Image (spheres, rainbow, N blue to C red):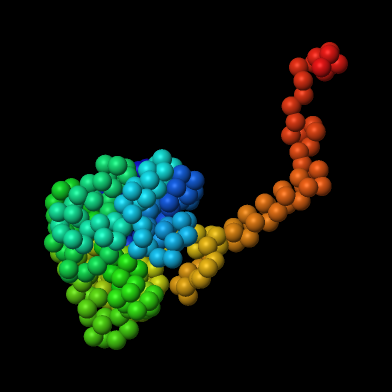
């Protein structure tokens, strides 16, 4: 498999081949996503919740993000590596957004950044892309705006609200985004936005008519089960499998069937050594 770049993403979009994205947040998950032949590996700030146990993504710091970016980058060789800018590290000004993006590339070893928001961040997107850093947008349900949105709820359900999502999408495209995550909007809204854009849309809870799909790794593998949105499909119950494996080990240690004296144990150098000992 060849290294995935922005050019690969562009080609997939032109050929109407769905673009695949899965999140990762450390060395093993970066490797797992890469070996699964995903096009894009996204260090999404959702790891604040699914891997660090925070209540929301709001408390995630840039240093925490960079720490996890570096670990993910060490495991992920072929997929295109994108990372979220944490809340508060890009909204102050285009200069702050650019400075944060440089950190994600230089210290986090990522290849692109993702930012939540619409027309209001267009100027920042312009500055970052002009500096040579690809930007992925994120519209619809934007978890960093949880309190302003009144919780995690479907966006753009009326024609008027859908129009606002479309306006934001067009502004982000004009500002230079190479792709756009559309989260939790009705299928027809994502479909129409996709058909009106020249850049690929990556849907999550946005129906089948986007240019690609993204899922959060802990959700799709059945590891994080505090809550599960309607749009998530679970491809494996690995949380249960891991707990069962741990419990089997606990039981075997307690009843002394592990470790096995031959299979899991080192012998001495020779019978003579054993006798002398
Ligand atoms: O943080 C994240 O995992 C994301 C994806 C859901 C797009 O932003
Ligand atoms: Na995110």
Q: Residue at x 20, y 55 (%)?
A: 97
Closer to us: 157 or 56? 56
In the displayed structure, 203 sits above or below 101; it is below
Image quarter where the N terminus lies is: top left
Work out whether residue 20 can be spotted. no
Furthest residue to the right?
275
For image coordinates 41% across by 43% down, the residue present is 71
In the image, residue 100 above or below residue 208: above
Q: Position of residue 276 (x, y in %)?
A: 84, 13
**Who's the residue at 25% across and 57% down the image?**
89
Give the left or right position of residue 21, taking residue 163 as reference. Answer: right
Confirm whether residue 121 shows in the render.
Answer: yes
Q: Nearer the viewer, residue 259 or 164?
A: 259
In the picture, measured across the screen, residue 125 lies left or right of residue 251, that is left
Q: Quadrant of residue 177?
A: bottom left
Q: How many marks?
A: 0
> Which residue does the image show at 44% across and 61% down from the upper left?
54
Q: Residue 268, position in %: x, y?
A: 77, 20
Q: Is residue 215 above or below residue 255?
A: below
Image quadrant where one finds the C terminus: top right
109 or 234, nearer to the observer: 109
Q: Is residue 193 left or right of residue 221?
A: left
Q: Position of residue 45 (x, y in %)?
A: 37, 58
In the rendered image, which quarter is residue 175 located in?
A: bottom left
Residue 6 location (% of width, % of height) = 27, 51
């Amino acid at each position: 498999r060849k290294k995935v770049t922005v050019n690969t993403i562009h080609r997939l979009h032109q050929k109407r081949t769905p673009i695949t994205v899965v999140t990762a947040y450390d060395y093993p998950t970066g490797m797992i996503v890469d070996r699964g032949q995903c096009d894009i590996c996204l260090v999404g700030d959702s790891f604040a919740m699914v891997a660090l146990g925070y209540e929301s993504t709001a408390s995630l710091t840039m240093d925490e993000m960079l720490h996890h970016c570096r670990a993910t980058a060490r495991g992920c060789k072929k997929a295109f590596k994108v990372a979220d800018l944490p809340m508060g590290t890009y909204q102050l000004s285009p200069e702050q957004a650019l400075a944060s993006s440089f950190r994600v590339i230089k210290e986090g070893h990522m290849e692109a950044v993702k930012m939540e928001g619409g027309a209001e961040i267009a100027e920042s997107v312009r500055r970052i892309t002009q500096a040579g850093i690809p930007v992925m947008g994120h519209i619809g349900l934007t978890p960093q705006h949880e309190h302003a949105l009144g919780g995690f709820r479907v966006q753009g359900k009326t024609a008027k609200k859908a129009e606002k999502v479309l306006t934001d999408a067009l502004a982000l495209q004009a500002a230079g985004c190479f792709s756009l995550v559309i989260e939790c909007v009705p299928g027809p809204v994502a479909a129409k936005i996709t058909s009106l854009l020249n850049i690929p849309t990556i849907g999550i809870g946005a129906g089948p008519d986007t240019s690609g799909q993204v899922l959060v790794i802990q959700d799709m593998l059945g590891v994080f089960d505090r809550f599960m949105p309607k749009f998530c499909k679970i491809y494996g119950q690995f949380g249960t499998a891991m707990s069962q494996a741990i419990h089997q080990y606990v039981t075997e240690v307690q009843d002394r069937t592990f470790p096995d004296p031959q299979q899991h144990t080192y012998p001495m150098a020779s019978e003579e050594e054993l006798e002398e000992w």
